[in-house]
Structure formats: structure tokens, C-alpha cells
Image (cartoon, rainbow, N blue to C red):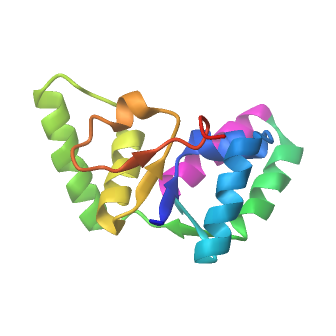
Amino acid sequence: MKEALLDSDTISYHLKGIASVTAQIESNYQYFGHLNLSVITYYEIMHGLMFKDARKQMQSFETFLKDCRILPLTAEIAHLAAEVFAELRRNNQIISHTDVLIGATGLQHELVVITNNQDHFKRIPGLELDNWVVKP
């Protein structure tokens, strides 16, 4: 089993109680002793919860974070993301900056990105993906 980098949508599905996602998260945590998310994912989840003033969900997210390593944005990740974004732009395959930064974090740390947003992330060359939403 390879270590995972959880995308925002995967965490949202877990917080909503989607059983397939929660089972995979629990299995990954048991195997590695922690979960991984990018600081960009942290930002995406937090600003969404703050905008909705979703205090109960924010408490659940903060509890969830106790089992997580929040991977910082480094100069190396930013440089890699810039290279990826430039190539995507040249090929008219643009995706959001946040997705590129999350993908570059996965590449830099050699993690498989867990997302239901396969269409965007599959544009990043060399990025390994998995989707826990569709698993039994």
C-alpha cells in the first residue's frame, strides 16, 4: 500500500459519512499511523466551512486533523507546480492553481492523490491517482 494524499473532496465525503471513503481512510490510518493532506487542502476545507459558518463540521474537521500530517507548500513544490502549470497551459489543459499545487505536493512526496476529481488531476503527468468514493 502506498501512502495517500487526501484531496479536499475526499475529506468532505468522509466528513459527510460516506462509508466507502471512511473505511479507506481508517485502513490507511491503521497501516501508516497518520493521514496526509496538503496545506492547500487544509485551506480549501477551512474556507468552505468558515464561509458556511459550519461550526459542527469544523469541529469534526479539527478532530480529523489530529490524525493528519499537513504537508507545507515549499519552494520545491511551488517550482514543480509552476512547471506543471506551464505545460498544462501550453497544451490548453488548464486546471486550477490549487489542484496543481496539490498534485505537485503528491509528486514531490511520492504520494498517491485520493480524489473523486479524476478529470483534472489526471492531466498532471506522472501523478498517481485513486478514488475511494467508488470503492465498495
Asked which quadrant contains residue 93, the reply is top left
* Residue 74 x/y as whole percent: 34, 67
Judged from this view, the residue extending furthest toward the top is: 92
- Is 50 part of what is drawn in magenta? yes
* Residue 17 x/y as whole percent: 80, 42
Q: Which residues make up the magenta segment? A: 38-52
Judged from this view, the residue extending furthest toward the left is: 90
The residue at the point 10 percent across, 29 percent down is 90
Is 19 situated left or right of 75 in this image? Answer: right
Observer-nearest residue: 133 or 135? 135
Asked which quadrant contains residue 20, the reply is top right
The residue at the point 36 percent across, 38 percent down is 121
* Residue 117 x/y as whole percent: 47, 32
- Is 66 part of what is drawn in magenta? no
Is 100 situated left or right of 116 in this image? Answer: left
Q: How many marks?
A: 0
User: Does any portion of residue 96 appear in the rendered image?
Assistant: no
Please, is residue 12 above or below residue 127 in the view?
above
Judged from this view, the residue extending furthest toward the bottom is: 33
Please, is residue 74 above or below residue 33 in the view?
above
* Residue 120 x/y as whole percent: 37, 31
